[in-house]
Image (spheres, rainbow, N blue to C red):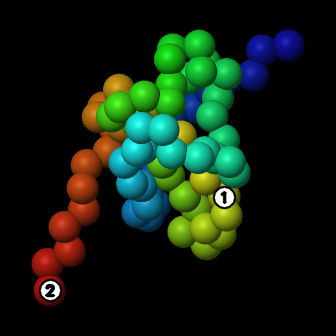
Amino acid sequence: MSIEYKQYHRKGLSELRPYIQGEDLTGVSISEADKQNGSPKEGDMIARNPKNHDDKWLVAKKYFEDNLELYEHNT
């Protein structure tokens, strides 16, 4: 069975912070693919669900750099 992937874009903002080398990552999901690529490592980011701050996951540096940029709110 093959299910087709479709492209989606985000409707809102993402909340992320830098990974700090050696920090306790209890409660942070890290994909097996990222682990195999050496994560967690410098440059990775930690994302959290804005509606549930206990829901956290690692975002690899390359994915972050390719897909996200800092939102600067102009007041």
Between 75 and 53, the one nearer to me in the picture: 53
Q: Residue at x 51, y 14 (%)?
A: 37
Q: Is residue 27 above or below residue 12?
A: above
Q: Residues within 10 Å of mark 1 (few under 14, many from 20)?
A: few
Q: Is residue 47 above or below residue 61?
A: below
Quarter of the image where the N terminus is located: top right
Asked whether, in this view, residue 12 is left or right of residue 35, the answer is left
- Separation of marks 1 and 2 at Cα, in angstroms: 29 Å
Q: Amino acid at mark 1?
A: Asp
Quarter of the image where the C terminus is located: bottom left
Q: Residue at x 59, y 46 (%)?
A: 24
Between 73 and 8, the one nearer to me in the picture: 73
Q: Given contact means CB atoms under 8 Å apart, are the residues at marks 1 and 2 in contact?
A: no
Q: Which label was assigned to residue 13?
A: none
Q: Residues within 10 Å of mark 2 (few under 14, many from 20)?
A: few
The disc, 1 or 2, on the residue closer to the chain's N-terminal end is 1
Task: Give how far across and how far down residue 43 sits, in percent.
Answer: 33, 34
Residue at label 2? 75
Which of the 4 quarters of the picture holds residue 21?
top left
Confirm whether residue 8 shows in the render: no
How many marks are shown on the rendered structure? 2
Q: Amino acid at mark 2?
A: Thr
Between 42 and 71, the one nearer to me in the picture: 42
Residue at label 1? 55
Q: Residue at x 66, y 41 (%)?
A: 29
